Amino acid sequence: MPLSQEPTLTLSPDDAHRPSVSAGGTWQVHALAQGGAMDTIASFLKTLKDARSVAWDLSAIDSLDHIGAQVLWNAWGKSRPPALRLAPEQEEFFRRLETTGKLELHRPRKQRLTVVMKLGFSMLSFFEHLAAFTQLVGQVTQDTWRFARNPLRGPWREISANIFHAGFQALGITALVGFLIGVVLSYLSAQQLRNFGGDIYLVNLLGMSIIRELGPLLAAILVAGRSGSSITAQLGVMRVTEELDAMLVMGISHGFRLVLPKVVALAVSMPLLVIWTDMMALIGGMVSAKIELNLSAQYFLQKLPDAVPLANYMIGLGKGAVFGILIALVSCHFGLRIQPNTESLGRGTTTSVVTAITVVILADAVFAIVFNGVGF
Amino acid sequence: MDDARVSSCGADGELTLDGSVPVVEITGLWTKFGRTVVHQDLNLTIENGEILSIVGGSGTGKTVLLRQMLGLERPARGCVRVFNEDISLADAKHLQQLRNHWGMLFQEGALYSALTVFENIAQPMLELHALPPDLIRDAVLLKMNMVGLGPEQANKMPSDLSGGMVKRAALARALALEPKLLFLDEPTAGLDPDRSESFVSLIKSLHRELGLTVVMVTHDLDTLFALSTRIAVLAEKHVIAIGPTREVVRVDHPFIKKFFLGARGQRALEALDAPEGAYAGVYQHSESEL
């Protein structure tokens, strides 16, 4: 770029009693930022013992800007040196610096938290989340009651759109993951069972683990990652763009139009996804069993109803519905709490997915305890 | 098509900032979004040191024209030269140099919401990786002072600021690297009259002090008349008239009549206290030129 010459400072000790420094070149931010210009200037200024005692001549500078002026101003200790020669158009910059005076940046007081205080804050925040979540559950219960009393005026369009997005569009990924897990599980179990000569128990092992445990859990984790994040992000963006406020102003309840449809949609589509995932995982298991143990698909299917009592299937479906409701509630909870800025949006979405998956696994543990004698 | 674009722009010159060439030169610009044509054979030249306002009805592509000048949209045909550099053909290094010499004030401020006001304004300076921290601190505070923000606002987050404050902080950020060219998109939209007034005088004093070239899109007639040295009117997909305010107002075109000579326009015009000039500088594209 031809426009800038390097900013220079030259010391000439010609005057008998007072050395003088003359500045030249371009003293604009882009020239200063090029190469090592700032370093050269800083080391030159260091060699001057007292920058204010020398005479300064800036009239040779071909162009100056506020940042260039600020560099010199700081070198002078933020006041005009006694001997200073300026070109007329440079006067403006230094006059501004002079009239502005010293500007102090107030550093915000850093909060030093002790471990106990941090623990206290996180406890408080946990209880706050718990209270808000309880409120949300209450709201949804009320809205469900309102929906049940007058189903014709319910948010059907929203529900069907949500079923499409969270359910139908998740078929591909759940099928793929389910199938692969089925193959892996069957393959690994077959090797162990063969050691004990218990090949035929593969059906019991696969059927029980997939239908009762893995199918619902896999589907839930995938849906939490897929739909949970999208629900949180959607509500968060609606907060940022003030759409949530617009709905309130028009008297459209967030609970009835946004939260309830998502809860209903996931409660409906999750059990269906569980059936689908179970099916795919069992097919994967069958394929692997055929290859590894030469167990025919016919035998597998014949043996399955005996090996897995129907109660397990029902527990799996129930788990699906409960997981779906929990995922929807958790994602809505975090979505509605997002502050109108980008950082909060990102953090909220992450927290939402992590919490949703954790809550699903916790609920799974509760199911295991509650139904511990059922279905064997 | 690509060859045509290269040849229509002529040879690439050196980046010039000394004012010998127009700051922005748009020739034969076409902008298309899918099948919608926004600009059709649009020509516009912006001279060094002027304040040019672009006016036009909603949806006539004023903001898109600004975005073309900033290289945020690609021309379908024609070329946009800023500081004598064709921005759709410039390589990364030249583009970065260009970007360091212009500042843009977005309509909604576009402050980084995760950073404080101070960090927002310091961001362009930090990107240079050459300035010492204490210099950046002083320079940011000076910029804030110039736009009328006290140091007590420095640690606030953008979401804690009022609309006027956001505009000021965004202006300070746009001015951070001492640009030669400043783009303003609706600078006074959403400000109360008092604040728009002070914003106008702020731009005026900065223009005088820093020798800026200002390109502004605005609907606000008071701002328009108070600031512009020239006005470009966008209608029918191109610039229908360009020239000093008083002359553009006289141009006989239905849009101009409606825009400037309605009740609001009359009031603003009466308030405009400018000496009557000759009508020589006005340039009106006639239909036949298309």
Image: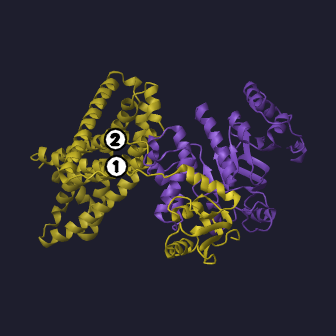
Chain colours: A yellow, B purple
Tag 2: Cα neighbours inside 10 Å, few (<14), some, or many (≥20)?
A: many
Q: Where's residue A376, x and y in %?
A: 11, 50
**Left or right, B250 with reference to B116:** right
Tell me the kind of residue under disc 2. Leu
- Can you give x and y, in whole percent of width and height, for residue B224 in the image? 71, 38
Which amino acid type corresponds to the residue marked 1 in the rendered image? Val
| Chain assignment, label 2 | A
Whether residue B209 is visible to the viewer of this picture, yes or no, is yes
Q: Mark 1 lies on which chain?
A: A
Task: Tell if the residue under mark 1 belongs to the same chain as the one under mark 2.
Answer: yes
The residue sitting at 50% across, 57% down in the picture is B138
Q: Which residue is drawn at 45% across and 30% down?
A: A247
Residue position for label 1: A223
Of the numbered discs 1 and 2, the one sitting upstream in the chain is 1
The answer to whether residue A261 is above or below residue A110 is: above
Q: In this view, does A356 lie to the left or right of B204?
A: left
Q: Name the residue under label 2.
A: A266
Q: Is mark 1 on a helix, strand or loop?
A: helix
Between A228 and A123, the one nearer to me in the picture: A123
Q: How far apart are marks 1 and 2 (CA)?
A: 9 Å
The N terminus of chain A, quarter of image: bottom right
User: Which of the two residues, B90 or A16, is positioned nearer the viewer here?
Assistant: A16
Crowding at mark 1 (Cα within 10 Å: few <14, some 14-19, many 20+): many
Labels 1 and 2 touching (C-beta < 8 A): yes
Report the side of A151 relative to B153 (left or right): left
For the point 86% across and 43% down, the residue is B282
Q: Residue A215 appears at what percent x and percent y? A: 26, 52
